Amino acid sequence: MAVTRRLLAACLFGAGLVLTLLSSLTSSLHTCVDQIARVGTVPTVRTCDPLSITDAPILVLLIGAVALLVPDLMKHLTGLEIPGVLRIEKKVEEQGRRQEDILRLIQQIDVSQNQQVILTTATVAELVGLQPEKRRRFESDAP
């Protein structure tokens, strides 16, 4: 999948370069705009220039190529920083270890609580079993 994305991104980059080159070397694939004429009787003049990196067709190809490469870049990126403003670090592995530690601790607490409930239940059962004997003693000691 990654190889396919990389090949497609390379094709998009290549297409952008080919379009720019063809536009520079030939009179086709030019971008034309109307500009206000400063001299003469015609109010507007049409000017045509070869494609550049800031023209929409080339930008679409470049943005598409970069978008295809983003997943691969994110795997290797350990941090992103805008000095003095923002810092983001990739700590997925560390967070995974923390979650495993928390899960282990929760399991230990659960086991401990279950053992405590079993001990408490056994103690209560023992005390309930002793109740008839204590009642007999109490009634026999009564005046």
Image (spheres, helix red, strand yellow):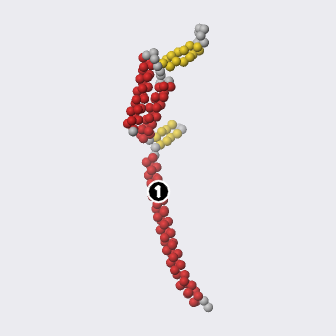
Residue 137, position in %: x, y? 55, 87
Q: In this rendering, does residue 54 appear at all?
A: no
- In the picture, the quarter occupied by the N terminus is top left
Extreme residue toward the left, this view: 3
Q: Is residue 141 above or below residue 44?
A: below
Q: For residue 138, what is the image quadrant?
A: bottom right
Residue plotted at (46% across, 49% down): 95
At horizontal 56% and vertical 13% (from top left) the residue drawn is 45
Q: Position of residue 74 (x, y in %)?
A: 44, 39
| Along the viewing direction, whichever of 40 and 27 lies nearer the viewer | 27
Task: Identify residue for label 1.
Answer: 103
SS type, badge 1: helix
Residue 32 lies, in percent from the top left, at 52, 18
Residue at the bottom extreme, as displayed: 143
Give 140 or 34, whichever is nearer the viewer: 34
Q: Amino acid at mark 1?
A: Leu
- Say above or below: 100 vs 61: below
Q: Position of residue 112 (x, y in %)?
A: 48, 65
Q: How many marks?
A: 1
Q: Residue at x 45, y 50 (%)?
A: 96
